[in-house]
Image (tube, rainbow, N blue to C red):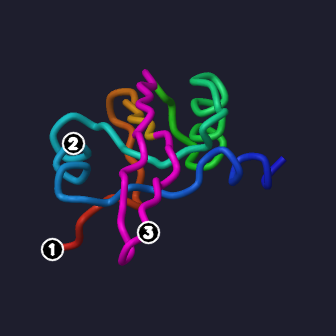
Amino acid sequence: MQEKIFSIIKKPIISEKSTALAEVANRYVFKVDTDASKTEIKNAVEQLFKVKVKAVNTIVMHGKNKRAGRFEFKRSNWKKAIITLAQGQKIELFQVKQ
């Protein structure tokens, strides 16, 4: 069961924008499996971090076209999930120490 959770949630996206979302709106951003549904993502986050998820929004980020010398290729598409937690819930992974 634990390996299924880690196959759904690949890694947190920690950027300036996602950190601001976490502080202001109690929303957290993760890179997730492209085949994962919103309910699977919700269950995985609730089991992994022991929090109550209020909403899940997903976005398919299209891969960019890149060049390496004379060769051109396309990066893979990936899925981003924005998790909104219930009031009073937190994920300590995203907290900034001052």
Q: Is residue 60 covered in magenta? A: yes
The kind of residue on which mark 3 rests is: Phe
Assign a secondary structure to mark 3: strand
Quadrant in which residue 40 is drawn = top right
The kind of residue on which mark 2 rests is: Leu
Q: Residue at x 36, y 77 (%)?
A: 69
Furthest residue in direction front, as rendered: 70
Q: Residue at x 37, y 53 (%)?
A: 65
Assign a secondary structure to mark 2: helix
State the mark number for residue 21: 2
In the image, residue 96 above or below residue 20: below
Q: How far across and down, in percent of the image, does residue 76 sit?
A: 52, 50
Mark found first going from the N terminus, 1 or 3: 3
Assign a secondary structure to mark 1: loop
Quadrant in which residue 27 is drawn = top left
Quadrant in which residue 89 is drawn = top left
Residue placed most toward the observer, 53 or 69: 69
Mark found first going from the N terminus, 3 or 2: 2
Q: Are marks 1 and 3 in contact (CB under 8 Å)?
A: no
Going by the image, does 20 lie left or right of 39? left
- The residue that label 1 is drawn on is 98
Helix, strand or loop for the magenta stretch, by majority: strand
In the image, residue 52 above or below residue 18: above
Q: CA distance from mark 3 to mark 2?
A: 38 Å
The kind of residue on which mark 1 rests is: Gln
Q: CA distance from mark 1 to mark 3?
A: 45 Å
Write down the region rendered in magenta: 55-79
Q: CA distance from mark 2 to mark 1?
A: 18 Å
State the mark number for residue 71: 3
Furthest residue in direction right, as rendered: 1
